[in-house]
Image: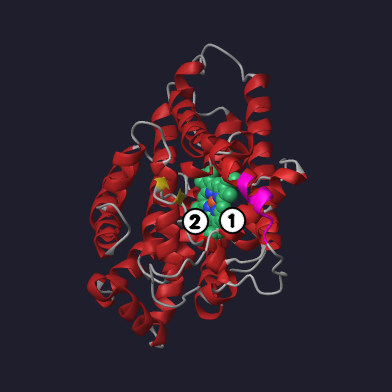
Amino acid sequence: MGALGWQQILRPWILLMLVGAIMTGVVLLMQYRVDEAHASTQRILEHPIFSVILKLHHWASAALILLSAVYLLLYLLSGAFRRPTHARWYGALALFMLAMLFQLTGHALPWDQRAFWTVAIETAIAGGIPLIGDGLMIALRAGESVTDATLSLWYRWHVYFLSAAMAAWLVWSVRLGWWRDWSSSAIRWSPALLAAWVACGLWLPVPFGAEADPQTNYSARPEWYVLPLHASLNTAQKLDPEAGWIGSALIPGILIALLVWLPFLFKSRADEARSPWLSLGAITSSTAALVFTLTAAQNVASPIREPEQKSASAGYPVIPIDEQKAALGARLIQERRCLKCHIVNGEGKDKGPELTHVGKKHPSAQWHMEHLKDPEKFFPGTTMPTYDDLPPEQLEALAHYLASLK
Ligand code: HEC
């Protein structure tokens, strides 16, 4: 059976980026040291050659995610996942998942503020899943909180387990015949792709900031490849602050299960011509994913805030606290389930910062109103839900109470 044209074009490109990522990864492995993650990354970035290798690694992984996602999408649209050639569909799915896992774990390795806080947020989101969440979070963090042990766990995954899985995938892909039937035009265009990659390595910077510091509360902006997940999380949280896990775990889980199941949901290719429903479904879901991504991108378009700018509520007037409003606010804190994520006077859970003395840090009730209406404005990428649907007098009461917590 002849492969489809787009497969013949994308596969050589995927191979090119895969080989590029592996080769640069091996070089980096020799330079990077997990016990001095930030310092060794800094040394790599200051070195004239290794810095380019690091950037090439960065951009090859990004290209792999994009190419394997496009590949998967075109596969879906073409209906070619149906039996009897479904093994190749699983091959494409496995490649995409591997690329994502490599990216997620690799993102932690520089161990700068961004890396640290992204890991903290991602694992906290996993911790929000009912029943298994707490155990899962501890497993992912290699402990209760994010520490060097977390980094070394993610490093081992990136360098050993995922690499072994990738090696196994490569063997499998040869057996699936992935690397046969290349399109000659794709090969003719390969030097252009290579040149674009090298240009990215030479001229595009990769983000790298101050060393991870658990004492600050820096907020990491979600990376582009998790934007659809982030949007789904936000939407679920808008419906119910506690329902975040539905968006971040249940819906993606169901989607992945569906993709795995797909070859068995449809008749085999011999039985039936292409189904129009399938294309319709694929187009609708990819449009939805795109819209989700764009809305999420818009939400996080503001630049990453440095910690010192962030914590200050400077510029907001401090007004005298109204005791009556504050008393109502104290009740609302309970009713509005803020304690699901915050500790106030020893009560509640610590998914977010403790609020017992938040009035010292943010003395302005005005600031609290603005923050509750749109937490993203102050903490881009935060998991805290928006409360813009509260009646103004309730918002005000909450704000007076929070400002009174000295
Ligand atoms: C789903 C969890 C969640 C819920 C529910 C939640 N928050 Fe938060 N909140 C957070 C997180 C996480 C942060 C930290 C912001 C960041 O860096 O992402 C935060 C930050 C804050 C801050 C700023 C604290 C600081 O130290 O700067 C205040 C004030 C606050 N929340 C108040 C509330 C109130 C009041 C409610 C209820 C109406 C509430 N939160 C509900 C997760 C939550």
Q: In this view, does 327 lie above or below 283?
A: below
In the rendered image, which quarter is residue 106 located in? bottom left
Asked if the residue at tag 2 contacts the one at tag 1, i.e. Cβ–Cβ closer than 8 Å, the answer is: yes
Between 263 and 281, the residue placed more toward the observer is 281
List the residue tagged with mark 1: 402
Is most of the magenta stretch helix, strand or loop?
helix
Question: Is the residue at mark 2 in contact range of ligand 1, meaning its CB lies under 8 Å from it?
Answer: yes
List the residue tagged with mark 2: 355
Q: Is residue 5 visible?
A: no
**Residue 354 location, x and y as percent?**
45, 56
Q: Residue at x 48, y 26 (%)?
A: 258
Residues drawn in magenta: 321-327
Q: In this image, 89 relative to 5: left or right? A: left
In what element is the residue under mark 2? loop
Q: How crowded is mark 1: few (under 14 residues within 10 Å), some or many (20 or more)?
A: many
Q: Which mark is first along the chain, 2 or 1?
A: 2
Q: In this view, does 262 lie above or below 54?
A: above
- Outermost residue to the right: 392
